[in-house]
Amino acid sequence: MVNETCVIVGASHAGVSLALQLRREGWEGEIKLIGNESELPYHRPPLSKDLFAGKKNLNEIRLRPAKLYEDNKIELLTGVTVNSINRNSRSVELSYGEPIRFDSLALCTGARANKFPSAERFKNIFSIRTASDVEKIRPSIVKGKRALVIGGGYIGLEVAAVLIKQGLSVVVVELADRILQRVTGEKMSTYLTELHESNGVRLLTGVSASQFEGDDQVTAVVCSNGSRFDVDFVVAGVGISPEKSLAENCGLNVGDGIVVDEFGRTSDPMIYAAGDCAFHPSELYGRDLRLESVQNATDQARVVASNICGKQVAYDSVPWFWSDQYEIKLQMVGLSEGYDEMICRGNSDLADKNGFALFYLKRGLVIASECVGRPKEFMFSKKLIGEQIKIETRLLSDESIAPSEWVG
Ligand SMILES: Cc1cc2nc3c(=O)[nH]c(=O)nc-3n(C[C@H](O)[C@H](O)[C@H](O)COP(=O)(O)OP(=O)(O)OC[C@H]3O[C@@H](n4cnc5c(N)ncnc54)[C@H](O)[C@@H]3O)c2cc1C
């Protein structure tokens, strides 16, 4: 491996973890980490949390200090786009500079925010995927301004929480019948709806933003139920799409992302993919998944690095995720889709400040949990799910039994 070169496309959570793990695994050849953002890589979750709220600046959320890349002999090329992959010559074409030859290639290209139809026309319809997106919105975050958020998913709700706390008026418009419908159960949606409404956010569900008034700036949004809101700006949190075009254009298999096997290998055994862009098999859930979380990006990237170095490690982590809204920390583990029973531990009333945990079960096994202010429940349910431990369900709701006792 001494004279071999590993090229990594995408310098964010997955790309950076992969590069560092290669060195830990003993990769002695060159590592070229190429990212098209001009920034030193940074943590993405704070974009809708502390960075958005102005509590942190970009330098406080760097993934790693610049020196660490140098110390590990990782050549970090920022502001450079990989335009294409030539599989015959085993090289990548860049937006500038000579093509780079690779022995192994890892695609960590992540995802891009979906644009809301008609957003292109207006300068004040924003989405949040990058630090530069946040910079574009920042001048609009002024007390007294009127914001409309399209999409009651995690990012939309985090944005709403920050904006209302900064003294703006905030309306959230969600097409589904309840917020977070795609990812959570009804009880959690109800809790979060009450949390937002008690903070002054106006939430409309079962409603879409159907008409935008204004020339190059939106001045009002008309919704499908006829309601009309004067606005100073709009934030669209309407999901993301995997960045798979590089893979697709060079003939690799793609689906809802770049198709990889359990080792993170694409249909070309010298090319790997990890993170938000990768569509991978999950033995735990018995199907192919594409996950959008820091845990998945970093864990999968580490596994891929080991495999590039010659190991045969299968990736099958239990997915987990978090969200910060107002003072609450929500921690989720597993995927609740297909559950047939839900158990609540604690009290999910807003007035109750002791937190609560929701457990989703399928045929008696916990497949997911969502915890508000309950780190122990979160930690031990991760174990229950990962090791598929079957326990008496009454133990989940019985507060006199500590979560550590669930796993014996
Ligand atoms: C606002 C926001 C809040 C979030 N909050 C949370 C949270 O609370 N918890 C959580 O777990 N996850 C959260 N996420 C999701 C998490 O950030 C992603 O899952 C994670 O960033 C995925 O990492 P990645 O490296 O796979 O992809 P990305 O972070 O998307 O990085 C991919 C990089 O590749 C670059 N790239 C793409 N194509 C090319 C090319 N051709 N040439 C060069 N470079 C290229 C992109 O510009 C980008 O820099 C949040 C995401 C956002 C946007």
Image: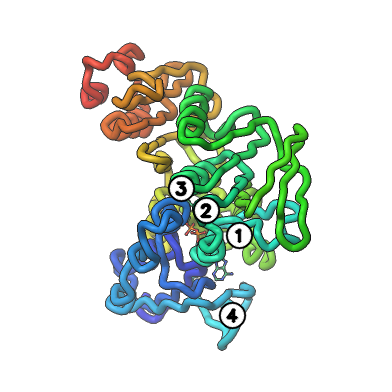
Whichever of callouts 3 and 2 sits on the residue coming sooner in the sequence is 3
* Quarter in which the N terminus is drawn: bottom left
Residue 11 location, x and y as percent? 46, 68
Where 92 falls versus 47 (above or below)?
below
Could you tell whether 200 is left or right of 150 in the image?
Answer: left
Residue 214 location, x and y as percent? 76, 56
Q: Residue at x 69, y 66 (%)?
A: 249
Query: Which residue is labeled 1 in the image?
Result: 243
Q: Amino acid at mark 1?
A: Glu
Q: Nearer the viewer, residue 91 or 380?
A: 380
Query: Which residue is labeled 4 in the image?
Result: 94
Whichever of callouts 4 and 3 sits on the residue coming sooner in the sequence is 4
Whichever of callouts 4 and 2 sits on the residue coming sooner in the sequence is 4
Mark 4 → mark 3, Cα distance in angstroms: 38 Å
Whichever of callouts 1 and 4 sits on the residue coming sooner in the sequence is 4
* Quarter in which the C terminus is drawn: top left
Do callouts 1 and 2 mark residues in contact (Cβ within 8 Å)? yes
